Structures are given as C-alpha cells and as structure tokens.
Image (cartoon, coloured by chain):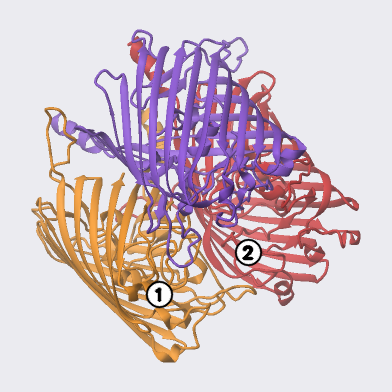
Chain colours: A orange, B purple, C red
Amino acid sequence: GKKKAADAKKNEFPSFKITGFTQLDSAAYSQSPNNIATVGNAQDGTGFRRARLAVQGKVAEFTSYQVEMDFATAGRPSFFDTYVEQSNIPYLGTVRVGQFCQPFSVDSLTGFRNLTFLERSLPFLAFVPFRRVGAQAANIADDEMSQWAYSVFRTGGYKNAPLGDNRYGVDIGDVGGVSFSTRATHLIQYDPHANDRYLWHIGASYDYSVLGADTAAGSTTQTPFYQTRVLPEFGPLGYSEDAQAFGFANNSTPVFVDSGRYPANHFNLFGLETVYQNGPWGVQAEYMATVVDSIVGNIFYNGAYTQVAYRLTGEHRAYDKKNGTLGRLVPFTDFFSFKKKGIQGMGAWEVAGRLSFVDIRNPDSLNGQYLNGTSNAGNGTLVDSTLGFTWFLNTHTKFQGNWIHCMLNNSDRGHSTANLFVSRVQVDF
Amino acid sequence: GKKKAADAKKNEFPSFKITGFTQLDSAAYSQSPNNIATVGNAQDGTGFRRARLAVQGKVAEFTSYQVEMDFATAGRPSFFDTYVEQSNIPYLGTVRVGQFCQPFSVDSLTGFRNLTFLERSLPFLAFVPFRRVGAQAANIADDEMSQWAYSVFRTGGYKNAPLGDNRYGVDIGDVGGVSFSTRATHLIQYDPHANDRYLWHIGASYDYSVLGADTAAGSTTQTPFYQTRVLPEFGPLGYSEDAQAFGFANNSTPVFVDSGRYPANHFNLFGLETVYQNGPWGVQAEYMATVVDSIVGNIFYNGAYTQVAYRLTGEHRAYDKKNGTLGRLVPFTDFFSFKKKGIQGMGAWEVAGRLSFVDIRNPDSLNGQYLNGTSNAGNGTLVDSTLGFTWFLNTHTKFQGNWIHCMLNNSDRGHSTANLFVSRVQVDF
Amino acid sequence: GKKKAADAKKNEFPSFKITGFTQLDSAAYSQSPNNIATVGNAQDGTGFRRARLAVQGKVAEFTSYQVEMDFATAGRPSFFDTYVEQSNIPYLGTVRVGQFCQPFSVDSLTGFRNLTFLERSLPFLAFVPFRRVGAQAANIADDEMSQWAYSVFRTGGYKNAPLGDNRYGVDIGDVGGVSFSTRATHLIQYDPHANDRYLWHIGASYDYSVLGADTAAGSTTQTPFYQTRVLPEFGPLGYSEDAQAFGFANNSTPVFVDSGRYPANHFNLFGLETVYQNGPWGVQAEYMATVVDSIVGNIFYNGAYTQVAYRLTGEHRAYDKKNGTLGRLVPFTDFFSFKKKGIQGMGAWEVAGRLSFVDIRNPDSLNGQYLNGTSNAGNGTLVDSTLGFTWFLNTHTKFQGNWIHCMLNNSDRGHSTANLFVSRVQVDF
C-alpha cells in the first residue's frame, strides 16, 4: 500500500500530453488595379496556415513545461510557446522563462485556436512584439477580478527584427535588445452565477523596447532599427524561404503596409482594451499607439479595432480569469453525423463584424535613411472592414469564412482597395 | 456513478496517440558507363529515407484528425497526411479535408510501412499526383465487397509542380490548379471464413487535373506546365536543399527519366489494378496511362508493373476493405532474441519479384518549348526488374533487400543499365 | 479472463512515450582585442541551445525504438538518436541499428541533460565523431562491473564531414567512409550497499575512421578530407543557415580553433577516461589523441580535461552500469514554491571546476593543400578554465552558470583571451 503510493508519486513526474491544431486556409482575392500595382498581384491559394504540436506536462508539483513547434509558419518548424513555469511563488505568483507571447493586448494573448476572425487585428499585426525569449511574472487578485503580468525579454526576433514571431527563439547582438512589457486587466462586471456569460473587462498594456543590433563583421543588422510590416488580416500561405520585398506577391499573401527599415533606438507602445460579453453577444475593442525614437526624432503610429460577434445558436465564450482573455466556445449541440435513425445537431453558428485601422505614415525626413534596401514605398494607412461567420461542428472543429474589404492609402501610390474572400477549416486537440 | 460517467465522456475528447516509422536505407550502385554519362554518377550511401511521426485521435464521436510530418524527405520536415475527417454522413460516407493521398491506384494508397519492395512502382512514381490539399468523400458498400472514393483537390504541389508530394501542403496560383480524382475497387473473390487469406480484388482509377500557374511578378511558374521525374524505384537519400538538374547525382539518387517542363493545360490519367492473394502467394498488377494536353497537342505516356510475392513461412497480408488496400503482414512467430535456454522463432520470410516499365518519350515538336532551363535530355523509357526479400523480425520490425536491374533507354543517349543493391531496416510504431 | 489477457498482450505493442528537454542559454562575452581580431566579435545573446523531442517505446518483447529530433541545432530539425534495438542476443548482447552516439568517451556518452557544465569538454568537441548512422553491439559482464560496446558506422556526416553531429542521418559517397569504434569500461571500486554513491570507473576507447568522399560531378567533397572546428565550450546560438568562415562571428558563437580542411585518408583516435565519485564529490578526467593520415603524412593532435564537482547539499549522481556513464542527480528536497504557510526546500546545489585543452597545430607543409577555401588561419592551441554552479530546483529543472576563461594560441595571430559568462535554464521530461 504505502510503497505503492510512494511509487505512484514517484512515477507521476514527468507527465506529458500532446496538444495542437491545424488550420487549412483558402483565399480568393479581388484587387483594384492600383492595389495590384502597389502591393503586387496576390495569388489565390490553399494551404496550411498553422500546424502546431505541443508537448506539455509537469515535472514537479509546481513546475510545468511546454514545448511547442509550428510546422507551417516561417521557420518550418518555428519555435512557439516553449517555456518552463514555476507557480506559487509569493509576491511574484507564477514565473515563466522561455519563449512565449509577451504580455500585451487581449487580441495578442487570446489563443490562435479561439480567434473570432481568421487573423488578429491590424493594430496587433502592426505593433506588438509578440513571441520573444524572456522571463515573466504573472499573478491574480484574491477575488479573481484582476490579473497582471510583466516581463523582461530580448527585443530582437529573427535577425534583430523587433516585431513578429521570433521564429527560432534566438536573439543575438551586442547592442541594446532588452524590453519590458506589462499588462493588467480588471473585470468591472462579472456575474458569478452564470459562469462567464455576462462580463465586462477592461485592461491596459505598456511596452518599452530598446532596439538591438549585431555589430559583428558581416552582420546585416549593424544598427538598431525599427520596421513594421502589416498583412491585410489574412496570413501568409506559401514558401517563406523566398523573402518578398514590398510590392511583390509571387508566392504568398503580400504585405499591405511596410514602414521600411530605419535606424531607431527604442520605442514606447501603449494599449487600451475592453471586452464585453452579454450571453450570445460579444464586443471587443482596442487602441494602440507606438512612439519610435528614430534617427529623425519621434515617429508616431497608431491603430485600433472594434468587433462585434453574435452567436445565432446562443452560446457564449469561456473567460480565463488567470490570463484575462476569452477562451473557447462550447456548442450546445455537436454537429452529429447523421446516423440512419440517429440524433442530429447543428453545432454552433456565429456571425461577426470588425472594423480596424492602422496609420503608419513616415515623415519625409526619413528619405535617405532607410536600411537594407527598404524605402518609403510601403508606408501609409490601412482600414479593413470584415464580415465573418463561424460554424462550430463541435468543441474542437470549426469552419470559418471572412470577407475582408481592405482600403489602403499608400503614401506613394494613393488609395486602392482589395477584397479577400477567405476560409478556414480548423481542428484542435 | 452518473456524474462520473458523464465526466469520463467529457474527458474522452480530444484523444491522441503517436504513431510513426523510420526507414534506414543503404545503397550500392553498379552503373554502366553510358548510365553514368546519362544520369550522373550515383553515389553509394546510407541514410534515413523516411522518419515519420503522426499524432492522431478523435475530437468528437464522429470526428477524427491526424497531423503527420516527415523529417527525412524534402521539406525537412514535410507535411504528410494531415487532415480532419467526419464519418457517418449519409450518401457521402466519410468526408476528409486536408492534405492526404488522393484516391488513385492501390500502389499509391498502400501505406509506406507495408510496401513489398523498398519503393513503389515506376508508373506510380511517374504519373500519380499523390499528396495534395483537398476534400474527399469515401464510402463502402453494405456487403463490404466494394468501396469507392472521390476528391477535388488543388493540383499544384511545391511551386505548382503537378506530381510528387506537396511538401508544405500549400498551392498558390491564380491560373487553373483544380483536380478531380476517383477510385473504385471490388472484391470478386473473398473467402469470409479465412480472414483475408484468399481474395481477388479489381479496381479502376481516374484523375483529371487542370494544371496551375502563379502569375505574380517574380514567379518562376507563370505558365501552367507538366513535368514528371522518375527515380529508379529507389528513393532519394541526401540533402534535398540542393536541387539537381537531370544528369547530376552529386548528393542523392539521380532521376532516371525526366520529361522536362513544358507548357500544358491539363492531363487525364487512367489506371487499372488487380490484387490476388492465395494464402502465402500474393500477386499485384497495374496499368496507367496519362494524356497531357500540352502546347504541342496531346502527349501520351504510359506504364505498368506486375509483382509476385511468396511468404516462405506461410503468412498472408491483411486486407483493408474500407480502403481497398493490402495491409500488414503479421508473422506467425516473432524473431525472439535467444535467451540462454529460451524460446526461439524465425520471424516471417518473404521473397518477391517485380517487373515494371514507364514510357515517357516526348515528341520532337516540344524542342524549344521547355521551361525553367529544362530540356528534352531526360525523356525515354525505363524498365526495372527487381528481386526482393523481406525478413519480418516481428509485426513492427523488418529488414529488406532489393536487387533492382534498371534498363534505361534515354532518347538522346540510348540504352544503358544500372544495378542497385539496396537494403532497409524499418521499425514502425 | 484468458481472452482478455491475450488482448492485453496484443495491445501492449507498440508502446510509446514522449521525452525531451529544452535548454535556454544566455551569453555575455568579454574578448581581448586580439581575440576579436582572431575569431571575430562574438555577440551576446539568448536563445535555445537544444530543444529535443523523442518518441520511444517497444514494438515487441525485446525490440525497442527511439525517434529523436532536435529543433534548435543546425538542421532545424536535426536527427538525433533514432534507432531500433534488439536485446538478449547471445554473444552480441544488445544490437542497435540507426543514428546514435558512437561508443567513444564518457563525456560523449553522458546525456546532454546531465552535463556538469554547459557543454562537453574541448577534446570531445575537437575529436569525437559522435552521432553517425551505423550498427552497434553492446554488452555487460555478469557481475555488472564491466561493459563494452563496438560499432561499425558510416564515417561522414553532413557533406562527408568526419566530425560533429550528422544532422540528417545521411552519408553519401563512393570513396571510403567506413569507421569502427569501441569503448570498454570497468568499475575498479563500487560499493554495492550505497547505490552509486561510491565508485571508481576507468575506461578506454578506440576509433578507426576511413575518411570518405563523393566523386559525383558537382560534389564539393570530391576528396576524402579531415577537418576539426572547436567551439570554446559554449555552443552555437543563432541562425545555422548562414555558414561562418573562421574569423567571423556575425550570428553565432565563433569557432576558436579550426584545423582547416585538407586531404586525408583515415585517422586513428585513442581515448582514456576515469570517473571517481565519493558521495558529494565527483572527479572526471579524459585524454584523447588523434593521428590523421594526411596528404603530408601523419598529423598528431591531442587534448585532455579534468573536472571536479562538489554537491553543497550532499547529493551524488546515479551511475548507469549498462552504458558506463554517470546519470541524473536527484535532489534530496525539491525547491518548493512557497505556499503561504507551506513547506520549503532549497533544491540541490553544485559547484564545479574544469581545466581542458586541445592542441591542434598544423605542420607548415599543409600550406597550399587546404580545400574548399579553408586555410591555416585557425590552427593552434586552446586552454579553457571553467568555474560553474548548478541549482537543481527539482529532478527535472535546473539553472546553471559557467564562467569560461579561454586562452587561445592561434598559430598565425598568437595569444588572446576571452571570458564567457554563460547561463542555462533547463527542463527535461
């Protein structure tokens, strides 16, 4: 008895389980002639947007780990959330070390598998550092109505790029390259008797990033720089080994806004967010502004989005108090495959709309300062309006369609539009 | 009781398990001088031909998934069968969406881990689109004597190539690029009292593929094209990042027949197949013909193979009625490692022979039409005769050897021969 | 009952479990001016040094398998120990076929997750072929005081390189390319009543490698060659797709000693080792010498290291009699996260020192013989002294710091020094 129990205890760690998901996306583009001239001729296509496998488990009572790789995105495979975490530390709460989404914005921290639309919003795509290597402390108030997290992390991603996923979880460079980020959220309304069905959440985020550089001979990033490149709220499908300059689309979704790469020392990023859920109704909005301390002085960019979702079949989404994010939608009935005389269900149905914009206009004084062959060709503003529907066949399988109407105002080439008709089949496990 | 059962139900999904296999191949080549001059000096070598891991499970009662990656083939890793599947749908049967082997040919759909020889036959290698992203419906007759499947899928693989595995599960291009494929099989003899030991299966397949192109500026595949490249029934070992033109063999098994790349709009592919099993005897044969609607009119290619296997130790192979394919051989006794006074077994032993050919001769009118630096240098006919043996140590471990005698008739350089002495250690799980 | 048992038996194989580990390293360099001039300006950085996932299990009573990939090192992913193994064979013992660490040196065969310092010693880094594809037999004496292993394997790794991990488990080339390696160890002192706490182990290794070449047109390795490149006992962090010549450090830890690449036919490698453990004290030392049969006659290189570790908290390390290696340290108490009124522990604490050197000086007669653009610029001697500490939070989580003082004597540029302040967060499962 006793020995057996001790053995069981002994064999409990390490534990493991596998989780992951795949997203198979299709896209059909309709671009105005000036849009083709500006961003390139976007090709229709079908392909895996994400294919992610993670191993997670515990190695001791308060120590857990995760190793997550994505086989569809740029690194083929790329490092995603790969970290070790120690919980129950006084004052600090839960400490995490590794590569993970830095604490900033509810859009950023809501898991990919639970997105309302096919991709996150324009301001997220434009401004948030996202997955980096660092250390974070996170905690929650005793009444569970507030949570907060803060982290220090290496600024640079792949080749010191300050934004976008750090595909290999590596940052190298003797210059700068340290960031601080924090986010705090609070539930100002929460019905404790109705699960997460009725709530109102507000939050704020702040990030200070010292940009980094690699000063070794032969490095292509000898100067700290800033660059943001914005996709039209639909992700890349294609062969990431072939890099694309702005204005090209030969093998992937083209970039719609590109600030170019220019010398800069640091940036300050601010964010405000709110989430409101009233049964089948969900509303979410964010505003972000970034101030880049560049070689020509401060450059100001900003963006925002607001989105509304309605579940025709009445469901709501779960809320994760620990992370201050929305979670999964669980359909009231699964879509049962029809047996001959069997039960039938419809799954859950959601419709949603989003309006988002980013303003990434560069001052003329930057001309002549751009690095690595980039230029002022891509800067401008982008407004997207999106209509979407989601059919949840069951808790883990969904089919989504989005119509994205992009209104681009490129500083060089002026106004152009594109319509994206995009769909996704997703299974998660 | 009741709550516990409900909890168990709740926790049942998603489920996962890991399956996979590795194949470690060795090759020694003996080429005639003209063969070296024609295809390049093939180097002896040892290496992993395939190393595949898949996660599979169910996310709802009738919804299953698989994510499969191969770490040895071209993409390092490459997408293999990665899909979500919904069963029990009336009329349609089982619907699958994702990347998977399109329904065509018994040789194609027999799993790699259950091949009689080290690789599939010449006509398969030459003509079958194989793994693509698409949607398939498959069903089986009530008496389980017939099954059929049909699919629509994106034609293009890696950079719009119409044949060979689609290594990243992506197809991009504004032109064409949609295919239809179907296969139906029937058991005209099946002894229901002897498992799968006595059976005679026939089948037919058809594929119509509209070839695709990427018209964006900078694309290297602006015109829909056809190209087939045939290996000598032994797979590539090497560093796939270095592409090889026809006639080179610096780091891999060389291509023996190459049609070159030429403009074409679509192709029609036809296949006939039969499988016969009489206890330890197994016979299998297929014929395939493809008609390419090219820039110079219809081009006709064809090929066939026939193979015989005999299990010295008496075993037969399982038969999968749902897919109309042969399955695993389960040895009567395992090869037990000899304990000092312990039991001993021999495993199972199989000998087999195969004769296969492809005829891929181009009309002279194609000269001057070849794309991307290809030419008419590689077209011709290839006949392979193969002798093979397999030692099954147990249900999951086998050692195989093949002697492949290749008789190549290159349109430019005439007749040449090569002998390949190749072996494999395989474990699957 | 009976049927159920038979079913259980039937379902027992194949089994699988997942194991792996991640190492997140950080480095700060302080180089003397001449060191920067000699090896390049090493950049500070943080990144994953190793991120390894393995699937392992049994497919029959005496047949086991492992598939292991690393997502952080050069191949992204790279093949690591991937093999099938049959045990209980008389005379031979356990036979393994696949890619694995060839039997040579206790430093080499001690698993990465159990290293005392962040990386293995200079002589290991300089001389040992390490992971290759081959076949090995291993056995242990009846009294378990001695074990031995021997193997034949393909000499070449990635593009016929004779040393360093064979990232893709492939070796190709018509010339040479076969090696033999063996290692035997003996416990001359072992207290059977105290687990592995008191022991004295000695061992010897020998490797004979016939160097290989790929003679196909277009190959960059047409001549058998020798080359060794030595890192300063800290591993590469960075983007391995960009190769670095000696003297560059734009995206990774620079190589400190590089023999250059020169024609050679074979080499003989010898090793002696000892391990001593007295409770919390551990001592380990090795000597290695290699004789390269080069185009200018025999070239002699050698190296050695000695290291001492002391566990402040009293623990010892496990010993693996089957492999003749040290294993894991299990802390007496875990570092418990502090609960409000809860239990507390400190984990285990270890301090250690190591002195190591390699002498890789080339004769002048090699000038003019170097291949592939290499030269005599990198040859010389390197001495490292290292101070290290390890905090084991629990059996599977540790935090390590090393101060490595490198004393380089480059044949061209003379003496220079570098100090590396490096740390690691590791979790294994």
Same chain letter for marks 1 and 2: no
Check disc 2 and report its element: helix, strand or loop. loop
The image shows residue A340 at horizontal and vertical percentages of 14, 27
Quadrant of the image for the C terminus of chain A? top left
Mark in front: 1 vs 2: 1
In percent of the image, x 42 and y 76: which residue is there?
A209
Between A160 and A51, the residue placed more toward the observer is: A51
Between B39 and B290, the residue placed more toward the observer is: B290
Q: Is residue C332 visible?
A: no
**Seen in the image, is A54 located left or right of residue B15?**
right
Q: Is residue A386 visible?
A: yes
Label 1 resides on the chain identified as A
Q: CA distance from mark 1 to mark 2?
A: 28 Å
In the figure, residue A39 lies in which quadrant? Answer: bottom left
**Which numbered dot is residue A228?**
1
Q: Which amino acid type corresponds to the residue marked 2 in the rendered image?
A: Thr
